[in-house]
């Protein structure tokens, strides 16, 4: 189908109007009238993903993270992002981004994360949208049965793609958890919201020392921190299932998390 037709389908599910005011979503480069037979889905619009798209014959890359989040006055090929744009255009590959509009969609990024770590029951937003309470940031739901924090952390590590960052937990490892809150991507702004919603454990990424320490002092809710890329990657499978009846889709398995190595210190 034409790229413009595919964009209409995507935006019917992830309305650009739902994106935050600071965000940059939508078509980044590409001709809306061009034909698309194959799409590559990825979290990050980085060089390795562009290489994968070109090698695989994709005419479109859809990413979660924007390439041009901050305003620019040009895209010369003398810059990394400029080179990416030029290379995609020369290769006939379009780029489309669904970011915070996909975060708050129903279903969206956090729904996929919750299902990946074993939440099977109904989900509701942690921070509902005023316009539609079915949408919003984060999700909260129940595990089929209680488990210890240690077990839940191991389950999350097994369910999410492996990264150098890994999965780490804050709280009593033997504490029983059942009500799970999640937020794909950086979610420390929702720590208090998750606690107020009754979560036993809150899984997100990019957690910082001071908010975590203060949270543990404020109550028993445990925190689980995973790599930013890993918490958003499960959404790609949902997007693939949505698009696959209309176009060939491939989910990139390249680990594009920024952290590439970890080492343990000697005590």
Image: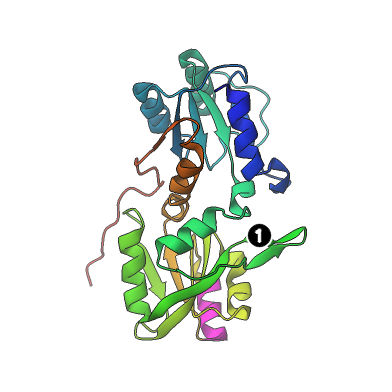
* Residue 267 in view here: yes
Query: Residue at position x 53%, y 28% from top?
Result: 81
Identify the image quadrant of the C terminus. Answer: bottom left
Q: Which residue was labeled with disc 1?
A: 136
Q: Residue furthest left?
A: 266
Where on the picture, by quarter, is residue 48? top left
Between residue 242 and residue 226, name the one nearer to us: 242
Q: Is residue 215 shown in magenta? A: yes
Q: Is residue 83 above or below residue 144?
A: above
Per the picture, the main secondary structure of the magenta-coloured stretch is: helix
Query: In the rendered view, does 101 fall on the left or right side of 157?
Result: right
Q: Residue furthest right?
A: 131
Q: Is residue 139 shown in magenta? A: no
Q: Is residue 123 above or below residue 44?
A: below
How did the renderer colour the structure?
Answer: rainbow
Q: Secondary structure at mark 1?
A: strand
Query: Residue at position x 43%, y 47% from top?
Result: 237
Span of residues in magenta: 211-219
Query: Residue at position x 69%, y 64% from top?
Result: 128
């Amino acid at each position: 189908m034409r790229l413009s037709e595919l964009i209409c389908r995507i935006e019917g599910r992830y309305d650009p109007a739902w994106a935050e005011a600071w965000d940059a979503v939508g078509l980044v480069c590409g001709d809306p009238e061009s034909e698309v037979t194959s799409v590559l889905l990825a979290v990050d619009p980085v060089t390795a993903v562009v290489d994968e798209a070109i090698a695989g014959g994709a005419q479109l890359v859809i990413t979660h993270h924007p390439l041009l989040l901050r305003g620019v006055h040009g895209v010369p090929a003398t810059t990394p992002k400029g080179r990416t744009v030029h290379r995609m255009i020369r290769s006939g590959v379009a780029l489309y981004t669904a970011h915070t509009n996909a975060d708050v969609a129903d279903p969206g990024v956090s729904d996929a994360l919750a299902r990946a770590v074993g939440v099977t029951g109904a989900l509701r937003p942690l921070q509902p949208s005023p316009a539609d309470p079915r949408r919003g940031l984060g999700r909260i739901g129940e595990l089929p049965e209680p488990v210890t924090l240690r077990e839940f952390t191991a389950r999350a590590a097994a369910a999410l793609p492996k990264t150098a960052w890994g999965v780490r937990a804050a709280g009593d490892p033997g504490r029983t958890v059942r009500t799970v809150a999640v937020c794909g991507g950086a979610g420390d702004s929702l720590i208090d919201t998750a606690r107020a919603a009754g979560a036993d454990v809150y899984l997100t990424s990019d957690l910082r020392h001071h908010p975590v320490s203060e949270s543990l002092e404020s109550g028993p809710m445990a925190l689980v921190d995973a790599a930013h890329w890993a918490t958003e990657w499960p959404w790609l499978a949902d997007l693939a299932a949505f698009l696959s009846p209309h176009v060939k889709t491939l989910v990139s398995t390249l680990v594009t998390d920024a952290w590439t190595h970890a080492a343990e210190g000697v005590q």
